[in-house]
Image: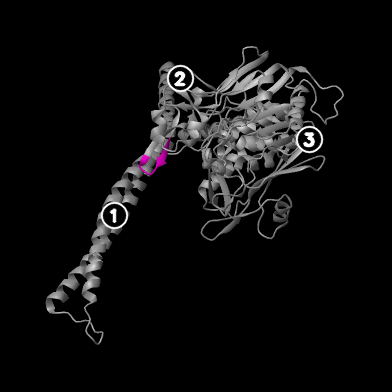
Amino acid sequence: MIKNLKAYAVGLLLLLVLITLVMVNNQILDETRLDLTENQVYSLSQGSVEILEQLEEPVHLYYFFSDSASEGMTGLRNYANRVESLLKEYVSASEGKLILHKIDPEPFSEAEDRASRFGLTAASIGPAGEAVYFGLGARNTLDDEAQIPFFDPQQEELLEYQLTKLIYQLSDPEPVQVTLLTDVAINGGQNPMTGQRQPAWTAFEQLQQLYNLTVIGADAKSIPEQTDVLVVLHPQGFSDSLMFSIDQYALAGGRVLAFVDPHHESDPMAAMGGANPSEFGPLLQSWGVSLSDEVVLDGTAGLEIRTATGSQRHLGYLGLGEAEISDEDVITQSLELVNGASFGALTQLEQAQSQWEPLLLSTDNASLLAASEYATTRDVVKLGRAFSPDSEVKTLAARISGKAHSAFDKAPEGMDVDRPLDETDSLNVILVADSDLLNDRFWVSKSQFFGQSIVTPFANNGDLLVNAVENLGGSDALISIRSRGTYSRPFTVVEELTARAEQTFRQQEQRLQQQLQETEQKLAQLQGQQSETGALVLNPEQQQTLDEFTEQRIEIRQQLREVRHKLDKDIEQLGSWLKFINIALAPLCLVLILAGVARLTRRNAKEVLS
């Protein structure tokens, strides 16, 4: 009886302790967060916090997720939880400026109509093709709206950037005005060599999605007045008036991002032979910079490419890793890989008064080759023979700022300018000595995902472009949060073992498939021995052989099924065991430790009482 009362008392005491802890957690520790993940994926970066602090008016977030329609889609639901957790973190950090609404848009409901009004579309997912909404709509007090149509799990690294950018757009409704000056077919068009229509470059589509973009060509006479950032891609054939307009724009405090190149090889006509250089020299010189008319070859950063004879290292196609990318500048410090082709070398002139900050570099295993010779050398092996490293690191991109003077003594004839600017103390230019790096083939692959075209970057070329434009456009906070860590933690050991097991399976499968094919060919030969009436005519020996081949075919097919079944079973068992170790073992150890501590505590208490 006494033992029962003690048990009831202990149970009641534990219940009171639990209630007290819950109340303390809700009332006192509600704002306290502890993120123990490797990349702090549940915490907001400083850039996001800064943008939330600048938020002056409330913003409503409408998070649409088809909870009921996504039953059984474990991966998608896990990612949905990840998105919701991060949204709640934004709300918590916003001090009441963000209001989150979670909505399950069931079919033919008012919630589904609301999702449609935000421009969200349902993806057909699952074996039955269920319509699943997984997006975000947002609205500020001025009824400006922004949306993320669908949270693509493959773009998880950009999740915080996407959310913060959406909030930033609504907090600062004035978009950045970007002018793209180029004659390169970056908007797509017909290939003059093949006659086929080429899609628009992803870099161009990025600029269209993120900014108010105006595209002008070499036939323009001047820069649009409302330009916040001028992007120049492979300048060629600019008139004096256009060059003068760029010159005066830069001297007046305009921000310029220029991609110049000793040989722009993404132009289909460039394959006809000869170098295809940018023509921007006078302006570069006035800014204190020169661009080589030679191409940088790099024996270390050269990329492996496929040729007719196999894989070869192309010394003119460079993959710049973290060692070659500056970690001191905000636009490059988060980049891991930038690919490009036929880079030129930038050099600061001796008499330059401007400030010089390298952003991209070659390795010290590099040399220069005349662009004309590079352009006509098709054989990668011959290109390697022309390589003679000089142990000098080349600058492939740089930020130019500070003092600069005009490239013109006076305004070109026909231009009516009262007082042209002669110099400036606040030049703001970023130069990249390659224009090919914006071509899709150097940084993205495209695929279909639930009926939508998904772009998957394999290099940070697009990030370099967007970071530079955002930096020049005045938003450093967004740059600091690009490409953060991923939440998912794949079981890499299982994946490696699976790959190895599948390789073994493929070998067995290939052997059995070959046996099966040979058997079926022999069967077909025997069955083809028909009489004039079309009836199958076989002697007893042939009939026995036919029966043996038939049995053999059945046996081989059965072996194939058994090999496949055994492989799936082994992988499943291995995965289950490793997941148990990773997921359950740690809590189990913690329980055992706590049980040991409790036992030790009770023993010490008894010793004290005795």
Is 570 situated above or below 92?
Answer: below
Viewer-closest of 77 and 456: 456
Work out whether residue 454 or residue 600 is closer to the camera in this orientation and state it: 454
Residue drawn 77% across and 31% down? 241
Which numbered dot is residue 118? none
Mark 1 — residue? 509
Position of 377 with respect to 397 (left or right) is left
Q: Position of residue 123 (x, y in %)?
A: 60, 54
Name the amino acid, label 2: Asp
Span highlighted in magenta in the image:
304-310
Q: What amino acid is labelled 3 in the image?
A: Pro
Q: Are marks 3 and 1 in contact (CB under 8 Å)?
A: no
| Residue 428 appears anywhere in the view | yes
Q: Secondary structure at mark 3?
A: loop
Which residue is the extreme one toward the front? 413
Task: Determine crowd level at label 3: few under 14, some 14-19, many 20+ residues with C-alpha closer than 10 A.
Answer: some
Q: Is residue 308 magenta?
A: yes
Tell me the quarter of the picture where residue 545 sits: bottom left
- The secondary structure making up most of the magenta span is strand
Residue denoted by label 3: 224
Tell me the residue that label 2 is attached to. Answer: 364
Q: In the image, which is nearer the foreground, mark 2 or mark 1? A: 2
Q: Residues within 10 Å of mark 2 (few under 14, many from 20)?
A: some
Q: Three-letter amino acid code at disc 1?
A: Glu
Q: How many marks?
A: 3
Label 2 vs label 1: CA separation? Answer: 48 Å
Of all residues shown, which one is farthest toward the left? 541
Question: Does the magenta portion include 586?
Answer: no
